[in-house]
Amino acid sequence: MIKLFPIHVYKGTINPTADQDTETLNLLNDLFFRCKKNKWPGESNLSTGELNLNLHEYEELNWLTIPLKNYVMDYWFNGLNYCSLNVYLRDSWANLHGYGDTTIEHSHSDGYHGNCHVSAVYYFRKPKDCGHILFCDPLDYIKRLTPYNQLKGNELISSEVKAEQYDFILFPSWLRHRVPPHPSVEERIALSFNYIGT
């Protein structure tokens, strides 16, 4: 059996110190306090995207953004085999999920307005073994023309990537993904990042 055309997704971990964790939580809670539910498209609870997309400019997040950039560069060249460009972090925001909250299916590429190349999600708060991301199969429409055994429902065929608190996932920005309804009363806080090469 030969499997062709794989999509490379990278998972790793960045652990904050206790002080970094506390400072980050205080920052995010302050930002979430200024947000309104269901205001950011695709999010059923709170998102700092409503306020701005420059979360990475806060010094309280240097413990995360600096090492994350190193992982992105390795993924850019070795995981995706992208060409040599000046890669920079363009957008960042945080989403808060409570029980039942979701993120609708979407990608981080949208023509002129969303021309990023690598995206990341970092799980700052995540209850154990729940709230995982689902990456959609870009061959969904083709597979639905074939007699596969278990194609059910209208959502795009997807694969779950499991992660725990302080894990991050890097993926091509064009790869569609979604988050099913959050099954826990414990909060899930995910930070998202978009990188672009010029």
Image (cartoon, rainbow, N blue to C red):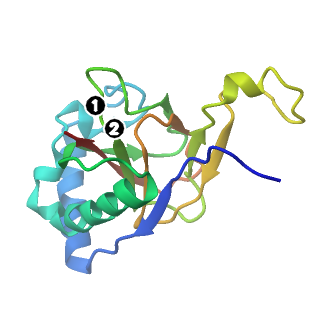
Question: Where's residue 20, x and y in %?
Answer: 21, 72
Cα–Cα span, label 2 and label 1: 6 Å
First in sequence: mark 2 or mark 1?
Answer: 1
The quarter of the displayed image where residue 40 is located: top left
> Which residue is more in the foreground, 99 or 4?
4
Question: Where's residue 129, x and y in %?
Answer: 60, 62
> Which residue is more in the foreground, 36 or 180?
180
Please give the label number shown on residue 36.
1
Q: Are marks 2 and 1 in contact (CB under 8 Å)?
A: yes
Residue bearing the label numbered 2: 46
The answer to whether residue 66 shows anywhere in this view is: yes
Q: The C terminus is located in which quarter?
A: top left
Query: Taking 20 as reference, is 181 left or right?
Result: right
Vertical order, 142 against 150 (above or below):
above
The quarter of the displayed image where residue 100 is located: top right
Report helix, strand or loop for mark 1. loop
